[in-house]
Image (spheres, helix red, strand yellow):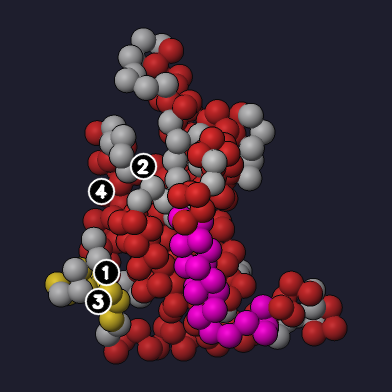
Amino acid sequence: MRVSSKSLSSEFKPAGFFRAKIRQHIFKFNPNESSPWRSWFRRVSEGEVVLGLIIANVAMFMLWRIADNSFMVKNFTISLDNFTSGRLHTLITCAFSHIDAGHVTSNMLGLYVFGKRIERIFGPEFFLKLYLAGAVGGSVFFLVHKAYLAASSKSGQPMKMDPSKIQGLGASGAVTAIMLLDIFLFPKSTIYLELIIPVPAMLVGIYIIAKDLMRIIRGDQRISGSAHLGGAAVAAIAWNRIRRGRF
């Protein structure tokens, strides 16, 4: 699915509202107490974090082609085996790995289209945290789902493959968090499917969540609906915190 986002005129009021809330939030901090981390983000130009994440994902995609495959699988994919072996970093590193060119292209397109507005409105620090939170949320939901399947297989439901050894990779959880937060904030905006078909953002959001639920119910072995729903959960939490002014 190729997507392009174009907002209706009604979006400008909430966008301005959120920018005003951000200013109020920022001014609560004492500049003299700013951490080096926050100072660094103040020097980052608009769109640089989106671009940086795209470059990192593409670089990792190229690394998969030249590095030792066993090393990459152990350190850049998420699985119950990796997690229980203590490789906790894979909760995040898996979100920079992709299986093929189509996989990385679709995720980076979604990251660019939806990410640039989220970064513009909320700033680079919030955007990077959202990406990483979506990555972790997707990984956690993936692991919980595989743990459930592993327990079910031991109780008498045969599986074609040991769920603990199934590997997950991709930025889909992180991108889903970004995409759905944009949709939650601007449900009346228009998203152009295949760059042609105009669809209300609200309907796209419902479709995305429903499709991932169906993937779980049908036992889709190719695309992890659970990882996507982890990103959706992060988006819902972020949206709720923004509405309450706690971001």
Q: Residue at x 50, y 49 (%)?
A: 66
How crowded is the residue under tag 3: few (<14 C-alpha within 10 Å), some, or many (20+)? many
For marks 4 and 3, give the CA distance.
Answer: 20 Å
Farthest residue, direction front: 66
Residue that mark 4 sits on: 211
Q: Magenta region: which residues?
A: 41-61
For marks 3 and 1, give the CA distance.
Answer: 10 Å
Viewer-nearest residue: 198 or 36: 36
Residue that mark 3 sits on: 190
Residue that mark 1 sits on: 3
How crowded is the residue under tag 2: few (<14 C-alpha within 10 Å), some, or many (20+)? many
Is disc 3 placed on a helix, strand or loop?
strand
Residue that mark 2 sits on: 224
Which residue type carries mark 3?
Answer: Thr
Farthest residue, direction top: 156
For marks 4 and 2, give the CA distance.
Answer: 11 Å
